[in-house]
């Protein structure tokens, strides 16, 4: 550097010729000319010489073994030493590296696959990781337009995404959606990123330590995934799923989806998602479905037993056998009036249980406030004891017209028998079957409960039809079977001998 400075000074400041400087310094003329004319003296980083690694031929093999390890218990995964031994024994024709080199590569690759960073997402998403978020949509359920929510699980590596829709955002909804997606994939993402949704996070303490909701904590332990949470106010850290929420809304929910059964609709969304995965990845040039296979290979196996999702609350039924839950009223049974009962809250239904945890009735879960749902079936046995009160109940007005007309003309005792029979038929089958039996019986010119029961048994018990000819014969003939009593003669003769 001193020689460069001297040459530049002699040329620029003292005006000496390049040849005279070359003669003075002993440098070649071309070197002097280069130094004299040089204008950029910033320090330049010297590029490292690229040298092939002895591991290059076996790196794909090592990567495959480590990815397969992600589906194995921790104690049955490869160590660097074990990989070195396998390479030496199974691939000695292409492997020529020391154990230390192998261990260093394995350690670096495990960090890449399993990740060690907290609080932010890496730019490069490894296979087997997922992100989850909610988004608002409008939908039409049983002809009624209402606001709903789409839960989306996205897999950034492959760009695959799976939406599920719900009528709320309570803790049962995301857990139900995740469980159903796991069941569809038959795998569980190794790491799942969430924002601080209240369904999972009960609170954030010092140093952003999160207190998880108990049911979410048990859910994560059951399926074995690691739950990662974005920094407060930094939802963009899971930007992939936020984009996927918008993509799903535009492509799957325009116009508003219409359905009668939300669970059946959600099941159908899996086929919609799989069809969407047949397109090319936006940057990798392969189909999303192909890349999804690498995601699945890096995921955890599905547990043998699914997690049962639901919270249980204890309540006391009022004098009508009804209970209030989340600002809404649900019918239970008059038999539990004034007693303690249990309510099992699920994403789409609630189950009402008695003190022995036996199921009384299942209702569709109401979202909102000030609503009431009534299932009259548990009340029918009580109504059968007080048949004159029938016309003053909502149940009577919910009955199909044939049953209203039939019951209106019965006597007190006939009405009691008919209500008991109706209770049996609805309990064993449904109201449609009971109505068909009534109409068939009335078409035959009969209207008593025994004839309705006969029609019901003929309709619901296939083997019962074998007895109908005998029954008919019994009606038209006074004697359809003559028993053989000769076998008793021996006893009569024995008595004569005495």
Image: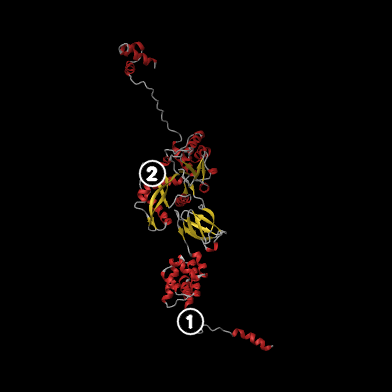
Q: Please say if 167 is above or below 94.
A: below
Query: Measured from the top left, where is residue 66 in percent x and y?
Result: 48, 41
- Viewer-closest of 342 and 303: 342
Quadrant showing the C terminus: bottom right
User: Helix, strand or loop at disc 2?
Assistant: helix
Which quadrant does the N terminus fall into? top left
Circle on res. 243: 2
Relative placement, left or right, of 93 versus 35 is right
Taking the view exactly as shown, the residue that stands out farthest to the bottom is 496
Q: Residues within 10 Å of mark 1 (few under 14, many from 20)?
A: few
What whole-number distance in Å separates the C-alpha atoms at marks 2 and 1?
A: 75 Å
Q: Residue at x 40, y 27 (%)?
A: 47
Q: Is residue 119 above or below residue 354?
A: above
Residue with the mark numbered 1: 475
**Residue 91 higher or lower than 184, as above or below:** above
* 338 sits left or right of 374 in the view: right
Q: Position of residue 256 (x, y in %)?
A: 36, 53
Q: Are marks 2 and 1 in contact (CB under 8 Å)?
A: no
Choose between 460 and 112: the one closer to the eye.
Answer: 460
Marked residue nearer the N-terminal end (2 or 1)? 2
Horizontal and vertical percent for residue 333?
Answer: 52, 62
Judging from the image, the colouring scheme is secondary structure
How packed is label 2: few (under 14 Cα within 10 Å), some, or many (20 or more)? few
Q: How many marks overall? A: 2
Q: Percent x, y for residue 424?
A: 50, 69
- Which is nearer the eye, 428 or 125? 428
Under circle 1, the secondary element is helix
Tag on residue 246?
Answer: none
């Amino acid at each position: 550097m001193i020689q460069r400075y001297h040459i530049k000074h002699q040329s620029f400041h003292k005006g000496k010729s390049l040849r005279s400087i070359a003669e003075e310094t002993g440098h070649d003329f071309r070197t002097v000319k280069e130094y004299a004319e040089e204008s950029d003296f910033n320090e330049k980083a010297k590029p490292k010489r690229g040298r092939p690694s002895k591991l290059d031929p076996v790196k794909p093999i090592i990567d495959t073994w480590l990815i397969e390890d992600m589906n194995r218990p921790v104690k049955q995964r490869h160590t660097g030493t074990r990989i070195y031994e396998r390479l030496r024994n199974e691939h000695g024709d292409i492997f020529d590296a020391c154990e230390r080199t192998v261990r260093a590569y394995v350690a670096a690759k495990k960090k890449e696959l399993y990740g060690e960073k907290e609080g932010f997402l890496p730019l490069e998403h490894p296979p087997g990781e997922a992100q989850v978020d909610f988004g608002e949509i409008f939908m039409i359920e049983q002809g009624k337009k209402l606001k709903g929510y789409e839960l989306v699980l996205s897999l950034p590596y492959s760009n695959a995404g799976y939406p599920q829709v719900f009528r709320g955002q309570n803790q049962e909804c995301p857990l139900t959606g995740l469980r159903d997606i796991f069941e569809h994939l038959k795998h569980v993402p190794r790491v799942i990123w969430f924002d601080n949704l209240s369904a999972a996070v009960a609170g954030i303490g010092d140093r952003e330590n999160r207190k998880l909701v108990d049911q979410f904590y048990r859910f994560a332990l059951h399926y074995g995934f690691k739950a990662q949470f974005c920094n407060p106010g930094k939802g963009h850290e899971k930007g992939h799923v936020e984009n996927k929420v918008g993509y799903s809304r535009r492509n799957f929910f325009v116009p508003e989806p219409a359905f009668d059964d939300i669970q059946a609709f959600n099941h159908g969304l899996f086929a919609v998602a799989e069809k969407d995965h047949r397109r090319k990845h936006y940057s990798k040039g392969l189909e999303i479905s192909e890349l999804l296979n690498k995601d699945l290979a890096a995921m955890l196996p599905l547990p043998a037993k699914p997690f049962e999702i639901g919270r249980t609350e204890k309540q006391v039924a009022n004098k009508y056998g009804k209970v209030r839950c989340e600002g809404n009223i649900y019918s239970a049974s008059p038999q539990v009036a004034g007693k303690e009962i249990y309510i099992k809250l699920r994403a789409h239904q609630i189950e009402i249980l008695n003190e022995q945890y036996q199921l009384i009735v299942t209702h569709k879960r109401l979202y909102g406030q000030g609503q009431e749902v009534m299932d009259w079936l548990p009340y029918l046995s009580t109504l059968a004891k007080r048949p004159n009160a029938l016309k003053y109940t909502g149940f009577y007005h919910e009955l199909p017209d044939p049953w209203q007309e039939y019951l209106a003309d019965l006597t007190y005792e006939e009405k009691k028998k008919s209500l008991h029979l109706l209770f049996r038929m609805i309990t064993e089958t449904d109201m449609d079957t009971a109505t068909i039996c009534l109409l068939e019986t009335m078409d035959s010119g009969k209207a008593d409960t025994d004839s309705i029961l006969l029609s019901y048994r003929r309709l619901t018990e296939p083997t019962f039809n074998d007895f109908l000819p005998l029954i008919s014969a019994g009606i038209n003939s006074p004697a359809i079977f003559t028993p053989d009593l000769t076998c008793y003669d021996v006893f009569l003769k024995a008595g004569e001998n005495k």
